[in-house]
Amino acid sequence: MSSLYDTSTGRSEKLVLIRYEILKAVREKIDAPGEVVENVAACLNLMTDVDELLRIREMLEEGVDAEELLWSICECLSKKVHPLSHDFTPAPGIQGLGVLQNVAVVDDPCELKRRLSQALLLINEGCTLLVPMEEDELLKRAAEVACRLVSGTVAMAVVVEKEGKELVGVCGVAEKLDRFPERARCLLEPAHTGEPLLMEDVKALPEARHMPPWHVPIGSAVSVPMGASGSLTGVILVGYDEKRKIDAGDVDMLRAFSRQVYFALQNRMLQVQVRELERLQERQRIAQDLHDTVIQLLFVMGMEAESLMRCCSDRPEVFESISRIRKLASRAAMELRSAIGAMSLKPSTGDTSLLELLQEVVEEWEKISGIHVTLVSPSQWPEISPEAQRAIYRVVREALVNVQKHAHATEVIVSVSHMNDRMIVSVQDNGRGFPAGMNSAEPSPLHFGMRNMHRLAEQVGGYIEAMNDEDGGAVVRFVLPLE
C-alpha cells in the first residue's frame, strides 16, 4: 500500500493501482450482482482524482453497501461533467423540430446513472454487432438496441443502397417492412444531410394523418445519420408514443450507436470478401492437388497404354481396346487441364489492371486449349468498381471454358468496348454455335456455365446475351450499365 505514496510512482500509476484495489475490495466484501460490479468498474475508469478514489477505498474498508458506494461514485463524477454544445440547423419545411444547444451540466446522480447505463449498453452491443450475422438480422437488432438505448416505443434501422434499394430493421412494429414508408420519407433526411432530425410533434405533419391502422401512434421522433467520416448509408430512427421534448444526451447516444452499426455493416462486408478470398484459395489448392496427382496418373496411364499397343500390334481387337483407353485417358487429361486452368486463374488485385488480367487469361487459355485468341480492348477504360472488374474477368473465363468444351472452334475474339452509359464485353468464336431453340435468358439447368455467367452479371447490375452469329459460331455478350 505504501507504493501509492512513493514519490517514484506517477499519478497515472497511482490511479490504476487504487482503482484495482477498490474493484478487488468490491468483489471480496460486497455481495453484489455482476452488473453492479461492471457499473462500478466503468465509473472508476472515469474518476481521475486520487483523493476521491482514496475516499472511496476508505468507505469500502468501513463496510459500505453496494448502493451507497455507487451513489458516492456518481456524486464524485457529477462534479466533473462539463457543458456540451451542438450546432444543428433544422431542415426547412419540417414542423416541430428541436435544436440541440447548450446541454446543461449533469448534476443529478439519477441522470448520471442513466447515462452510465447507456454507455454500458453501447459497449456491450457494439461488440455483439460484430458477431457474423445477416444484414436483416443485424438491422433488426440495431433497431431493438436503439429502442432500449433511449427508451423509445418504436425504432427503425434503415440502410439506403444504390439504385434506391432499402433494407429496414424494425422494433415495436408488428408488420415487417421491406421498404421505408413512403409518407414518412422526410425522416430519412439525415442520410443526406448528415445532421440529426428532431420532431417533437409528429402528428402535426400532414403525412401523419394517413398512417396505416397497424402503425403504433407516434408523438415525437428522432432520426440520426448512420455513417462515419462523411460516408452515410442510412438512418437510425426512434419514435415515442407521446409528444415530448427530445433529450440532447439521448441524441448523442443514438449518434454514437449509429456509428457502431455502420462499422458493423462494414465489418460484415469485409467478412463476405474474406470468405470469397478463402473460397478462391481453396479452389487454387484443389487445382494444384489435381495437377500434381490425377493429371500425372492419367499421363502414366497413357504411357502404359502406348506400351501395350506396341506389344499387341498383331492382335487387332486388343489393339483397338487399348487404343480407346489411351484416347480416353488423353481426353480426360485435357478436360481436367481445362477445369484446372479455370480454377487456378486468380482474380484481379489492386496492383493488376483489368486489361492485364484479361491478357493473362487469354494467353493462359490459348496455351491450354490450342485455340487462337485475339483480345481487342479500348484505348481508354471507364472507371468501374472492383466487383464489376471481377465479374467481367470471371464471365470471360467461363465463356472461354465453354468454347473449349462445346464450340469445336479454331478462332476466338474477346472484345471490350464502352459507350456513354454502358460497357460491352463480347466473346465470339467460329465454332458450331448454340443448339437450336436455346433460350439465353433462361438457360437450361444442364448449362451450368451459362447460369453462372447470368448470376455474375446480375450481381453487378448487368445482363448476358447469348446468340449465334450470322457468319457462324456463337457470341456471348456481357452488358454492364455505367453509373
Image: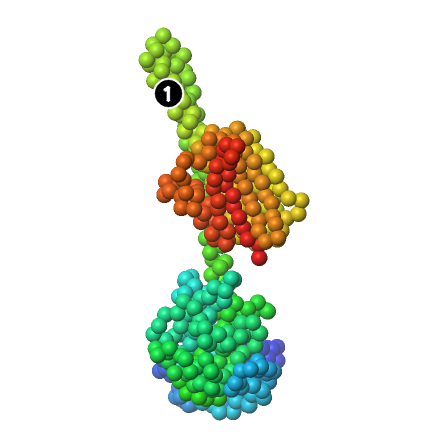
Residue furthest toward the right? 379
Residue beneath label 1, please? 324
State the residue in front, 405 or 132.
405
Picture residue at 40% right of the left edge, 79% below the top: 211
Total labels: the figure holds 1
Query: Image quarter for residue 113?
Result: bottom left
**Quarter assignment of residue 361:** top right
Q: Residue at x 36, y 70 (%)?
A: 176
Image position, residue 268 (x, y; %): 47, 61
Residue type, mark 1 in image: Arg
Please tell me whether residue 249 is drawn above or below residue 374 in the rendered image. Answer: below
Q: Is residue 200 above or below residue 417?
A: below
**Residue nearest the observer in this picture, 147 or 114:** 147
* On screen, residue 111 above or below 363: below
- Check the image and name the residue furthest to the top: 314
Which of 387/431 is in front?
431
Q: Quadrant of the C terminus?
A: bottom right
Residue 327 point in image, percent of width and height: 40, 22
